[in-house]
Structure formats: structure tokens, C-alpha cells
Image (cartoon, grey):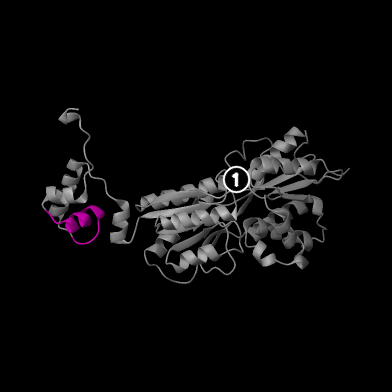
Amino acid sequence: MSRSAQPRSIATLDDVAREARVSVATAARALGGYGSVRNSTRERVLAASGQLGYRTNSLARSMATGSTRTLGIVISEIENPFFRQALRGVADTARAQGFEVLLANTDAELDKEVTAVRVMTERRVDGLVVCPADGGVTSHLSDVIAAGIRVVLLDRSMAGLRTDSVGIDDRKAARVATEHLLARGHRDIAIVTGGTHAMLERILRPDVGGVERASATMVGARAAGFGDAMVAAGVTIRPELISSGGPRREDGEAETARLLALKDRPTAILAFDATQSLGALRALSRAKVRCPEDVSLLGFDDAEWADVVSPGLTVVAQPTYEIGVAACRLLLSRIAGGGGAVANRRFPIKLIERGSVGPRRVA
């Protein structure tokens, strides 16, 4: 191998310091953007760095500055349009402030969340935005907060965990949605939730116990709001119309198909997110059930397709991107040393009426 063909060795911080004729400590401060360095010295160090092809060691820089300028984002379902939009809000805001983001998807499974949080902290993120899978299990996040890492909860809160959260009032939103269906004469109302039967039983049968823990999750809070509206209207909740099965579109489709196959099927369905709504629409189409003539459908989140399908989907809309922005701004404020009481910011919702909800059909 000729001398010119030999691979170029990786430049070190010592090489940059030698080329710029400064100490290693000065070169580190100039490249890391911390401490006091003269402009002329910084320019000389940067020029040497570029000439040698030096790449900053981010771990070493973090040990010197105490910051990696990275945020961890732990969400429950990346396929859900809500989380895609909220993630964009977090990432755009972070990058505008010179931070990068690390993303983990948990499929709404607690063990995956615990692992993701551990990996993020091992990578020395400066803070975490977390959408928790279980509102009652807080130990992994409590440990992170105790270690001095800031945490903001996205889309839900957690009982007993003193940290900031950003989202909507899910219980109130579901009550508004249910009241909309009740006002149109519907009484046999089903919910397609993506939650578990055990959790929903705790919500809709308070004598079973565990209501506070279950209602801390998004599914639990919306189920509780549905129950509030039904009880206030004096309408009995039919257990077979309480649907669960999983967070994915195919889960919503399968559960809706089960509901439609009932001898006394529902006249209206409330889907708890856009993914479940899309699954419900597919099931209605495949069963050749007319919407809203035979079964009305009301969903959460104004997905990009909601006003394109026929009929257009009536939804409870929330400012998803803005929620992500607010969560990131709050986290960055805390990282920068911002104090004050724990913030639980709740954004307003809007019921957008389209064609998928009609009056109850009288046989």
C-alpha cells in the first residue's frame, strides 16, 4: 500500500490543541462552547479542527459541561396520529434551541417503558418527555426525578408523581363527546378504547376499586368521562359494549366487528383515538353497515384523513402540535433552572361536527 493510500488516523483533541498552539483545556472549551475563550483563539481552534477533520466526543463534552443537549421522548404508540404530531412539536422546539431528541416507542407496554427510560438516562439525556403506559406505576420515573433529571408527562398525568404534565382534560372531553351522542337520542353507546378489560372494569364499576390509578391513564380518564355522562343521563352501561383489545388499528377493527355482530348492536360508537376510529371505519365498511344511518361514529383527534373519508368523521379535536411544543418548552425551562410549582397545563378541546353522527334510528 502506498503512503498516500494509507487510511488517515482519527484526529484527537490533543492534535487540535497542538495544531492551534493552545492547551488541551482551551481547545475543549472552544469546541464545546463553554467557559471563557477569546474570539481569536476560538477561531484558531475551529480552523484547526476543520483542517484535521476532528469530531467532537459528545460523551466527553457532556462530562465537562454537564449537558449532552439531548432530550429523550418516550411515547406509547408511534402509529397514532396524535403522537406523530406531538412528537413533531417536541422535536421542532428542541432543535430550535440546539437540542436533539432520542425517541423510544413502547407500544403502551410498561416493561418497554421502564427499559426505554433506563436507556435514555444511561445516555445522559438532559430531560425526558414521557407518555406513561400505566398511571399507577411511578417508581422508574420517581428514581429519574430523584437523580435530578427533569421529566414532563405528555397526554396524561400520574397519581403521586410530582412532575409537570401537558395535555387535555380527557375525562371532560369524553363526557362532552358522550353527551353529544346522548343528545341525538343514542342510548346503546359502545366505546372502542384500546385499553384492557381489567382497567375499564375498575372505572365503570367503582365498587371494584382502583379507580384513581386507572383514571390517570388516557384510556381510563376517557372511560371515566363516558361513565360520568351515561350515569348523569340515567342510562345503563351495557358491559358487552365496552370494548378493549389493543392500541393498533387492526385491534380497533376487530373489536368494532365484534360489536357489530351482536344481536342487539350499538347505535353509536365512541372511539378513543384516531387509530381506533380508522379501525372502526374499516369494520363498518366491511360489514356494509351504513354510517351514520345504522351506526354513528365519533372519534378523538382530527387526523389528516378525518375530513376526507365519507362521511366526514365527527371528532373531539385537540391542539396536538401545540401540546408537543408546550411540553418541550416546559422541559427546557426546567432544565435551564426554571422553578415554581408543578405545572399541569390543560389545553381546550373542540367538537368538530361532520357527517358520521346522526340521530338514533328508530326501528
In the image, residue 242 sits, relative to residue 308, either above or below, namely: below
Hey, which residue is sitting farthest right in the picture? 363
Query: Which residue is the site of mark 1?
Result: 302
Q: Circle 1 — which element?
A: loop
Queried whether the magenta region covers residue 162, the answer comes back as no
Residue 26: x, y in percent? 17, 57
Identity of the amino acid at label 1? Asp
Q: Residue at x 46, y 69 (%)?
A: 146
Residue range highlighted in magenta: 22-36
Badge 1, how many Cα within 10 Å: few under 14, some, many 20+?
many
Tell me: 68 left or right of 180.
left
Quadrant hosting residue 138: bottom right
Tell me: 129 left or right of 68.
right
Q: Residue at x 77, y 59 (%)?
A: 230
Residue 110: x, y in percent? 59, 56
Tell me: 269 left or right of 139.
right
Image quarter of the C terminus: top right
Quadrant hosting residue 248: top right
